[in-house]
Amino acid sequence: MVLLRRGFATMASLKKASKVVCIGRNYADHITELSSARPKQPFFFLKPPTSILLPGEGPVIQPKGVNLHYEVELALIIGKRLKDFEATDDATALDAVESYALSIDMTARNIQNEAKKKGLPWDISKGFDTFLPISNIIPKSAIPDPHNIELYLTVNNEIRQNDSTELMLFRIPRILSDISKVMTLEAGDIVITGTPKGVGPVVPGDVMRAGIKINGKELEEAKIEVG
Amino acid sequence: MVLLRRGFATMASLKKASKVVCIGRNYADHITELSSARPKQPFFFLKPPTSILLPGEGPVIQPKGVNLHYEVELALIIGKRLKDFEATDDATALDAVESYALSIDMTARNIQNEAKKKGLPWDISKGFDTFLPISNIIPKSAIPDPHNIELYLTVNNEIRQNDSTELMLFRIPRILSDISKVMTLEAGDIVITGTPKGVGPVVPGDVMRAGIKINGKELEEAKIEVG
Ligand SMILES: [Mg+2]
Ligand SMILES: [Mg+2]
Ligand SMILES: [Mg+2]
């Protein structure tokens, strides 16, 4: 008898995530560039699983009248149910992570700014179809320390974002603990961990490329190329 | 050979909804009671499927320091994939609805008010575990006209909410069309349609009862009783 490991993520299973939880304002310089307030604790919002765009599924669709921004982010794929999870060290937290991916948290910036001004939810600005391009799954073994990798994003081959995850304000143990005290995380759920500085607009025809470097070496599985 | 109807919702399948989409400010008197602005178009936010509380699953858990409010709402269970759905009449819209349920959109009002003031997402205030008590599934045939039923909610047997769905500002065709132009709705997704006036706080020990009346007659499947 062959036992399949329960919860082993596949590209097809990513779209069946029961939720995608997104951390906001987790890099100081990104907070400065959007003139936002620095949070005292992690805050988060949801993107619908229908926003996920797998490799090869085509371009990000720009909705009419939308100022479309990219935000490159490290994604965690959760490996087990986490409720009121207490993780004070990296080892405990990472034991709950099954694998990684790279993602781009596409944002309708004008809709989001309007929502912020009016005190309305962010979910429309974050939730359009195709608004979460994601890389192939990155095996856990490929990222020995998720707090010490370089995320980059280029638009038409010009570098726009390029920073280390060591700049995260709230690290993975805190993120997973805080989320799990509000909403139980299920195996297969996706958590995206915030974006470094350099966010900006793209228009149809632009090509975004994003990736991860570890000690200067490109990680093949993390590459995203999307129109 | 027996063919099971694809997409037929069961209580167990409700928690596997790929998303729960919630309409805000859809009844004029509720907008007034919260001193909110009347929206020019429907807006919406997400609750995580982990917030769903099925009949008999126990009480709503009040998180520490939270001012917990009830909002009784008619829920639609979607019957088929809807993308860029154009529904200008009730018949077209209701053809996409598989069944109904009654729901209580539990809200951490103090957290939501803080989020509104700071321009932050609503998702934490709406997304705690147990924050979406739901009734049994109501077969479509039991609700001939979803825009003409009475929703009620009592706390400790005192009536708090009691209004007709004919007071909805944006009706079901508009709601489904607008959502589906942002995020594709999948079969099994849940859409909750906003709350009438009368929202207010509950504390542990309070008993909420909610239901639907049609021409003064109680609908058995719609009854909710939750601590
Ligand atoms: Mg982001
Ligand atoms: Mg929100
Ligand atoms: Mg509500």
Image: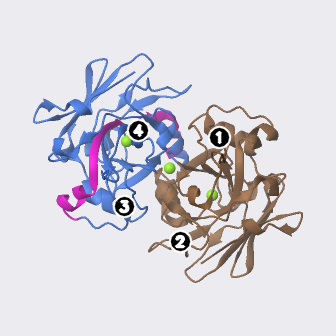
Chain colours: A blue, B brown
As rendered, which of A55 and B44 lies closer to the eye?
Answer: A55
Same subunit under labels 3 and 4? yes
* B61 inside magenta stretch: no
Q: Quadrant of residue A82?
A: bottom left
The location of residue A216, given as percent across then percent down, is 11, 32
Amino acid type at image mark 3: Arg
Q: CA distance from mark 2 to mark 1?
A: 37 Å
Q: In the image, what residue occupies the spot 73% across and 63% down?
A: B197
Determine whether the residue tagged by mark 4 lies in a helix, strand or loop.
helix
The residue under label 4 is A12
Q: In the image, what residue occupies the spot 64% across and 80% down?
A: B207
Image quadrant where one finds the C terminus of chain B? bottom right
Question: Is there a contact, CB below 8 Å, between mark 3 and mark 1?
Answer: no
Determine whether the residue tagged by mark 3 lies in a helix, strand or loop.
loop
Q: Which badge, 2 or 1, is on the more N-terminal residue?
A: 2
Tell me the chain of label 1: B
Amino acid type at image mark 4: Ala
The location of residue A192, given as percent across then percent down, is 34, 45
The residue under label 2 is B67
The residue under label 3 is A81
The residue under label 1 is B80
